[in-house]
Amino acid sequence: MPVCRDIIKVNTVGFCSIHDITPDVSAIVDKSGIFQGICTVAVRGSTAAVSTIEYEPGLLEDIPGLMQKLIPGGIPYEHDKTWGDGNGFSHLRSFLLKTSLTVPFDHSKLDLGTWQQIILIDFDNRPRSRELVVQLVGE
């Protein structure tokens, strides 16, 4: 069974910055030569997440607001006592959304809905250089 692995690099500003990585993932699937299978996208690190949304301005504002309501920044967390880096909220947000996503593909095209894009969300409290591993398995 053919396997393909590639890396996507994204520079972020943190603080719930949202990045559409669909074109990068699609390009990897397209050039892989694998006709049908599954694509897993995983961000390295524990203060970011990978998910899908309709990548539009309203949601790009709503998501940070939701995260602030669910897991507020600017308050102390037990994690902050361990490392003193003040990003306990970032780890909890990542835990909630998860660090990987699997999407099927067919005819070397991702099986996404019309308004569905794959996103990286960086929750950390500083800019980061993120690496995402894209792994394909199929035939």
Image (cartoon, grey):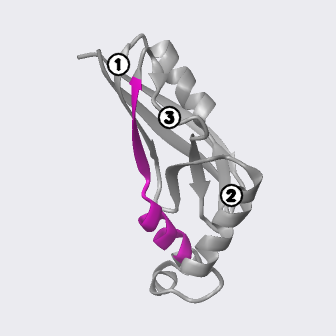
Placement of 94 over or under 44, stated as above or below: below
The C terminus, quarter of image: top left
Residue 101 lies in the magenta-colored region: yes
Identify the residue position indicated by label 2 in the image. Answer: 59
User: Quadrant location of residue 32?
Assistant: top left
The residue at 45%/30% (across/down) is: 111
User: Quadrant location of residue 98?
Assistant: bottom left
Which callout, 1 or 3, points to the residue nearer the camera? 3
Image position of 134 (left or right of 65): left
The residue at 42%/66% (across/down) is: 95
Task: Say what secondary structure mark 3 lies in.
Answer: loop
Residue 117 in the image: x percent, y percent?
58, 40
Task: Say what secondary structure mark 2 lies in.
Answer: helix
**What's the mark number on residue 104?**
none
Q: Amino acid at mark 2?
A: Leu
- Packing grade of label 2 (10 A; few <14, some 14-19, many >=20) is some
Q: Amino acid at mark 1?
A: Gln
Q: Earlier in the sequence, mark 1 or mark 3?
A: 1
Q: Is residue 15 visible?
A: no
The magenta segment is 89-105
The N terminus, quarter of image: top left
Identify the residue position indicated by label 3 in the image. Answer: 112
Query: Depth check: 32 or 79 in front?
Result: 32
Image position of 134 (left or right of 8): left
Residue 106 lies in the magenta-colored region: no
Identify the residue position indicated by label 1 in the image. Answer: 36
The residue at 52%/62% (across/down) is: 47
